[in-house]
């Protein structure tokens, strides 16, 4: 056990605050989406990622990467979303081994209806309690973490620009 770099008291406080804060944020977003839109946050993330993709379509592999879902979790969620008529899975036109996930018009309409309440909850729970300076510091800290993960090969996807899961059709920048 010698050589273990134990957390200092301050690092332990930061770590525990991070764990509690992220848990509370995820729970709040889940409650809001279930209450207002009747869908879990996982479904919202899938619909949002598809809404921002070219032709509202992604390969299942790419969709799993940008949502951080395992293949089995994504497949299960896609089955439920297909039952609702919000997405469909189709074979890639040039590579029949590749399955594409496509957002339907009905799915886009559902997402458009859910987005304002979701964005408001994100704003209320994450940004409103922070000053602009604190928000910028938070962004900088997250960027440093993401850079470190990328250097170790743990990033989600380095090929494409990041996707923002908020308002469908929202222009770059604040919505």
Image: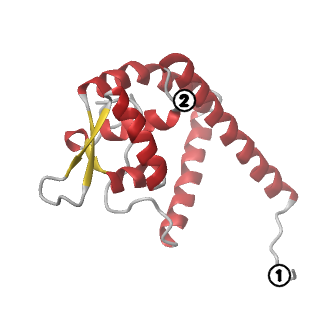
Q: Residues within 10 Å of mark 2 (few under 14, many from 20)?
A: some
Rounded to the nearest angstrom, the CA distance separating label 1 from label 2 is: 40 Å
Tell me: residue 136, above or below residue 95. Answer: above
User: Front-most of 91 and 60?
Assistant: 91
Task: State the SS at label 2.
Answer: helix
Task: State the SS at label 1.
Answer: loop
Q: Is residue 31 left or right of residue 43?
A: right
Seen at 25% across and 43% down, the residue is 57
Residue 23 image position (x, y, % from top left): 68, 40
Instruction: Give the mark count.
Output: 2
Seen at 42% across and 24% down, the residue is 115
Seen at 53% across and 65% down, the residue is 149
* Quarter where residue 159 is shown: bottom left
| 1 or 2: tag closer to the N-terminus | 1
Q: Residues within 10 Å of mark 1 (few under 14, many from 20)?
A: few
* Quarter where residue 106 is shown: top left
Tell me: residue 171, above or below residue 91. Answer: above
User: Front-most of 85 and 6?
Assistant: 85
Q: Is residue 79 left or right of residue 119?
A: left
- State the residue position of label 1: 3
Residue 102 image position (x, y, % from top left): 26, 40
Seen at 45% across and 44% down, the residue is 76
Specify whether residue 165 is in view. Answer: no
Specify whether residue 103 is in view. Answer: yes
* Residue closest to the far left: 94
Residue 82 image position (x, y, % from top left): 34, 34
Quarter in which the C terminus is drawn: top left
- State the residue position of label 2: 122
Residue 169 image position (x, y, % from top left): 28, 30
């Amino acid at each position: 056990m010698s050589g273990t770099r134990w957390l200092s008291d301050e690092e332990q406080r930061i770590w525990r605050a991070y764990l509690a804060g992220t848990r509370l944020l995820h729970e709040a977003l889940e409650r809001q989406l279930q209450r207002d839109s009747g869908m879990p946050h996982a479904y919202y993330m899938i619909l949002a990622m598809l809404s921002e993709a070219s032709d509202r379509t992604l390969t299942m592999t790419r969709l799993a990467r940008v949502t951080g879902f395992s293949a089995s979790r994504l497949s299960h969620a896609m089955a439920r979303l297909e039952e609702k008529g919000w997405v469909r899975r189709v074979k890639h036109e040039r590579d029949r081994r590749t399955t594409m996930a496509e957002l339907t018009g009905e799915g886009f309409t559902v997402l458009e209806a859910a987005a304002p309440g979701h964005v408001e909850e994100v704003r209320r729970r994450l940004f409103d309690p922070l000053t602009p300076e604190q928000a910028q510091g938070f962004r900088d800290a997250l960027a440093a973490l993401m850079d470190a993960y990328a250097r170790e090969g743990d990033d989600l996807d380095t090929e494409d620009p990041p996707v923002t899961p908020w308002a469908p059709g929202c222009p770059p920048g604040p919505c």
